[in-house]
Amino acid sequence: MAKTIKKGERISNGVERVINSDTIKYLGKQVKVSGWVDSVRSHGKIIFIDLRDMSGIVQLVNTSDIAKEIRPEWVIEAVGKVSKRPPNMVNPKIETGKIEISIENLKVLSKAKTLPFSINGGGYEINEEKRMKYRYLDLRRKRMKRNMIERQRVIQFIRDFLQKDSFIEIETPILTKSTPEGARDFVVPSRMQPGKFYALPQSPQQYKQLLQIAGFERYFQIAHCLRDEDPRGDRQPEHTQLDLEMSFVEQKDVMRLTEDLFINLVKKLYPEKKIQEIPFPRLTYEKAMKKYNTDRPDLCKNKNNPDLLAFCWVIDFPFFEKDDKNKWTFTHNPFSAPKPEFMNSLLKKKNIKNILTTQYDIVLNGSEIGGGSIRNHESKALEAVFEIIGYKKKDIKDKFGHMLTAFQYGVPPHGGIACGLDRFLAMMLGEKSIREVIAFPKTGDSRDLMMDAPSEISEEQLKELKIKVIKKSKK
């Protein structure tokens, strides 16, 4: 007869908790298991409880009245003996399908209200805003757990691959300087320096170049990047990218390394998928635009096969383009170097529209999943870029003086790439939105419905920061 345990009482002496997937190793022995009640089924006097933890599900069996009050999503702890299921009760769909645990002691650790939605199935039919408001519940579903595990597997593979190739992982600051890099910065007020602001990094671009100057010839980072952009399709205000930089390399070296990484990653983690063409095809920007009318061409020969991966490279981008005010701006990155044959034009600031950059983008099935370039490693060339896009020398010194100063102390030729992990993962897992592979994403208009952020702060905090909020007047 199972025993009910009072709140706070230990339910077993010396019995350590066993995760569900390991219970199959304890046939004939007593174990303690803990987790969430996935389902409860009553068959006359016998009650079956499917108990869920991070590793999977195990079936508990009880013949007393104590399990009758148990409800789905309650958190419980049970001690019992592991035994074989009757042959007609075996469940081949789960790892523990051949065994069950006869409950001897049972403890309710936490009760749960009825969930606002079902966590069974994929959840695509549920209003997305509701799912995001209760994201901690949405993450309980099997599909979301799979996505988070796959995310970790991909990141771990990348770390192992690069570390074996002499790369060193270095974290760069989250609080940095606001500089023009193509998107709007998130800014953070400084309490200690009133009237001054940090910026959150759009990317580790400048830091990784400074690390090359410091002599860390092969750097990488699983980097968190933040950009205060207007809502645009499947974008997030914060995303995760593989960021890497290498010294003493040319364009082909960075592209070859990146290609090898993706080829090996797919073969190891997603063997069911087929890469359409190796080495990856290379198209110039001009050819891609003429033939496909996009710089992210989908070269997939069979659009009905989700396991076919058509990687390609797009190269030879224009360095500059005109913005909506008819002023020159960079197409990708102000720190990029031009192709060698255009360096003289850059330094003289002539023939600007025809200058091609060393930028390279990697595209998968019509989506850009990464981009990089060989960088300018001479201060004159970097200054020329900023002058072309309209910065005066004083502005250049104010915004990028730290880079120009560093360039005076011996800079190796270097280049790198940044690859968007969220987008790549979504494609590998057949998800239509990157929100499905991010644990706690924002809405399309950058709101966190679960935390109710962004939100107002107190008057006291505003005073400490020497900030005054000007509210819009009501018309």
Image (cartoon, helix red, strand yellow):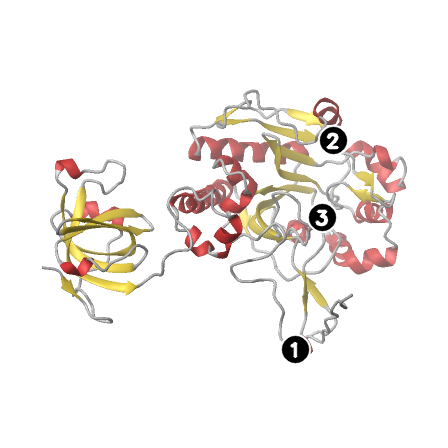
Name the residue rendered at 76%, 40% in the picture.
Answer: 331
Which residue is at the front of the view, 259 or 86?
86
- Of the image marks 3 and 2, the number of the one nearer the N terminus: 2
Q: Quadrant of residue 314?
A: top right
Camera-nearest residue between 114 and 276: 114
Amino acid, disc 1: Glu
For the residues bearing labels 3 and 1, Cβ distance under 8 angstroms:
no
Q: Residue at x 78, y 65 (%)?
A: 475
- Distance from disc 3 to disc 2, alpha carbons, whole Å, reads 24 Å
Rendered location of residue 211, percent (x, y): 64, 52
Residue topped by disc 3: 411
Left-right relation of 115 to 175: left
Query: Looking at the picture, does residue 209 appear above or below residue 341?
Result: below
The residue to which callout 2 is attached is: 316
Q: Amino acid at mark 3?
A: Val
State the residue at coordinates (77%, 68%): 473
Eye-nearest disc, 2 or 1: 1
Q: Which residue is mark 1?
A: 459
Instruction: Residue type at mark 2: give it.
Output: Asp
x and y percentages locating residue 203 in the rendered image: 65, 51
Q: Nearer the viewer, mark 3 or mark 1?
A: 1
Against 299, residue 337 (above or below) is: below
Q: Residue at x 68, y 64 (%)?
A: 198
